[in-house]
Image (cartoon, rainbow, N blue to C red):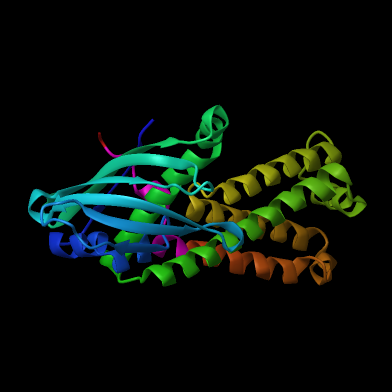
Amino acid sequence: MKLTAETIIRSDLDTLWRLTQTPCEHVRWDARFSHIDYLPRTEQDAPQRFRYATRIAFGKTIEGWGETIGERGNRSSALRFGSEDAWSLIREGSGSWVYEPRDEAIRFSTVYDYRVRYGWPGRLIDRLIFRPLMVWATRWSFDRLRLWIERGIAPDLALRLWSVKIAARIALGLVWMIEGLVPKLLVVSTEEILLAERSGFYWPTPEATLAMLGVAEIIAGLWLISGRAERLASALMTVAMFVIVAIVVATDPIQLANPMGGISKNLGLIACALAVWMLSPITPKASRASVARP
């Protein structure tokens, strides 16, 4: 399965070509590389050779080689790449970038593939982990480039904003999952049962209602963590939270004074939801760079 990505960027060809074909600009938005150096050409018409480096976990850097050929007038470039580094799963690969003008925008797309080392264990790791990660990184990087050009959001700032959004979304999702799992399924709280009884909103029993509500909260938390329709998820969870708070206030107002819940917890949840809602349109998202047509 080839790795593909495409996005529509409102840009002129000169700007897009410069940001994708100039090494110092390329590494700013492409999460797959941390350093690219062009090597001197041996002949004028020879492919442009380069060395690249990618930082991975624990400060380890993987180095590799590549060569590219393409002209702005042809609106495409071809690429070969590989690595002799034993830490690199990629042995050698090739691909292309295509710049297709569309009115006042450019359809920017890529198709590439590679061979891995270490036999069937390498192919298994590639299929289960590495290749999906590379697909995500390529598409996420394409959207970061789009935001840089269209909205003027510098790539390093986009990364920081994205990190804040992810932290807020995961925190919000974990709270919902814990609230559903611990007091409603694993260790059913007497206070929760009393609240359900006093509210009258239960069927067929308070315990069964709490169990169903717990499962729903776990599903909501998983939805938030997954990142699918994150703005809709954060909005619905906030509305649901206010509904629950309204029921609690009507049933047992003293619960709002609980230092481990009530107002203090809800304010934190609202802040996380607002962070997700506000940052989602201005942070990179891989799903916006759809599958490219071969």
Above or below, comparing residue 125 to residue 233 in the picture: above
Instruction: Indicate left or right for 281 with 15 as reference.
Output: right
Residue 33 forms part of the magenta stretch:
no
Specify the segment rendered in magenta: 279-292
Which image quadrant for residue 122?
top right
Above or below, comparing residue 250 to residue 271 in the picture: above
Residue 65: x percent and y percent? 35, 52
Residue 152: x percent and y percent? 30, 71
Quarter of the image that includes the N terminus: top left
Above or below, comparing residue 136 to residue 13 in the picture: above
* Extreme-left residue of the structure: 73
Above or below, comparing residue 285 to residue 214 in the picture: below
- Residue at 56% across, 36% down: 125
Which residue occupies the foreground of this view, 192 or 144? 144
Which residue occupies the foreground of this view, 231 or 132? 132
Residue 281 forms part of the magenta stretch:
yes
- Residue at 31% across, 68% down: 24
- Residue at 11% across, 57% down: 44
